[in-house]
Every structure is written in structure tokens, then in C-alpha cells.
Amino acid sequence: MSVDTPLTSAAVAWRWWTLAITVAVADQLTKLAVSTLMFYGQSIPLTGFFNLVHAWNTGAAFSFLADAGGWQRYFFIVITLGVSICLAVMLRRPRRRTEAFAYSLIMGGALGNGFDRIMRGFVVDYLDFYWRSWHWPAFNLADVGIVLGVSCLLWTTCHTAAEQQAAEQ
């Protein structure tokens, strides 16, 4: 039996929802700080590979659909709400801890960026990593939550598949 045994249930789902809300609130607080303390477009070099920036993204990852004319805001809001509701319901069922953790991070990131889209019409990004003149697209804490959650989910899926394969042999 795996070390990561099922733990979540309806009775403990609130713990995972709390984690998701914590990620969303932390994301919103950092965005508020950036929006309050920095001018739009400002860049503060911190290292030879990282800047703190104040950027807006009306699209999705890598500014996908950023210039689509405005309809994408509502499309992404609907997707965010749908995904968040699905993940909240999924967290009510028994899950492995790593799976529940991953869903919580994804939901928190989605809620953080979704709140931006509802209230601002765009997502505030502020983390700018670069190498020489090549810059990775700016991102934020919500994006980090989503990427870490998806990575954790992939790891859990691969780990579970490997356990099942070993058990069959």
C-alpha cells in the first residue's frame, strides 16, 4: 500500500478548500502590492535573471487570446468557475493527499486569476525571469499554484501507474 493513502472526504474537504483560498488570497495580496507600489509597465531588476514587473494580461497563458477583442474575459471567467466548482466537488470524495493537494493548488490559482478577470478585466503579472535578452512571459503566484498543482497531479498519476504496474508483476 502506498504511503500516500486516501485521506480526503466530505468531512475534511474544508482543509483542502482552505488551502485553495489561501493560495488565492496570497495571490491577490501580492497583486495588490504590485498594483499599489509600482506603476504599470515598471520593471525593477532584482538579479541578473529576474525582474519584478507590473504587467497586465487580458489573455491566458503566454498571452493566449490577449488581443481577441474582450470576449475572452468572459470565456475565461466561465472556465475558471467551472473548473473551480468541479475541483471543489472532487475534493469532497476520497483522494490521495498529493492529489487533493494538487487540486487545491490548481483551484487556488484559478480563483486568484479569476478574481482578477472579474474585478479588473485582466490579470496582474509581476514575475519576470529572463536569460540575456530572452524573457519568459511574466506570471504571478496564481500561475505558480496552477503549474505546481498540475506538476503534482502528473507526478501522482505516474507514481500510481508505476505502483499498479509493480503490483501486477
Image (tube, grey):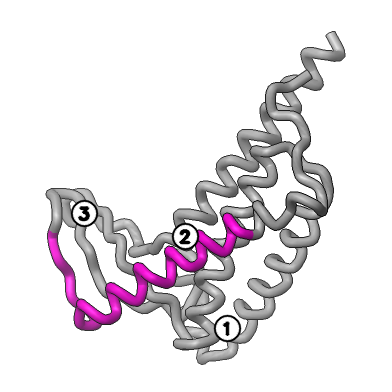
Tell me what residue is drawn at x 20 percent, y 82 percent.
Answer: 39
Residue tagged 3: 50
Whether residue 15 sits left or right of residue 13 in the image: it is left
Q: Is residue 42 above or below residue 146?
A: below
Q: CA distance from mark 1 to mark 3?
A: 29 Å
Residue tagged 1: 72
CB contact under 8 Å: marks 1 and 2: no
Q: Earlier in the sequence, mark 2 or mark 3?
A: 3
The residue segment tinted magenta is 18-45
Mark 1 or 2: in front is 2
For label 1, the SS is helix
- Residue type at numbered disc 2: Asp
Tell me what residue is drawn at x 82 percent, y 53 percent.
Answer: 10
**Mark number, residue 31:** none
For label 3, the SS is strand
Q: Is residue 133 above or below residue 24?
A: above
| Few, some or many residues within 10 Å of mark 3 (<14, 14–19, 20+) | some
Quadrant hosting residue 55 = bottom left
Whether residue 63 sits left or right of residue 92 in the image: it is left
- Residue type at numbered disc 3: Phe
Q: Earlier in the sequence, mark 1 or mark 3?
A: 3
Mark 1 or 3: in front is 3
Whether residue 137 sits left or right of residue 85 in the image: it is left
CB contact under 8 Å: marks 2 and 3: no
Residue tagged 2: 143
Residue 97 x %, y %: 68, 38
Q: CA distance from mark 2 to mark 3?
A: 16 Å
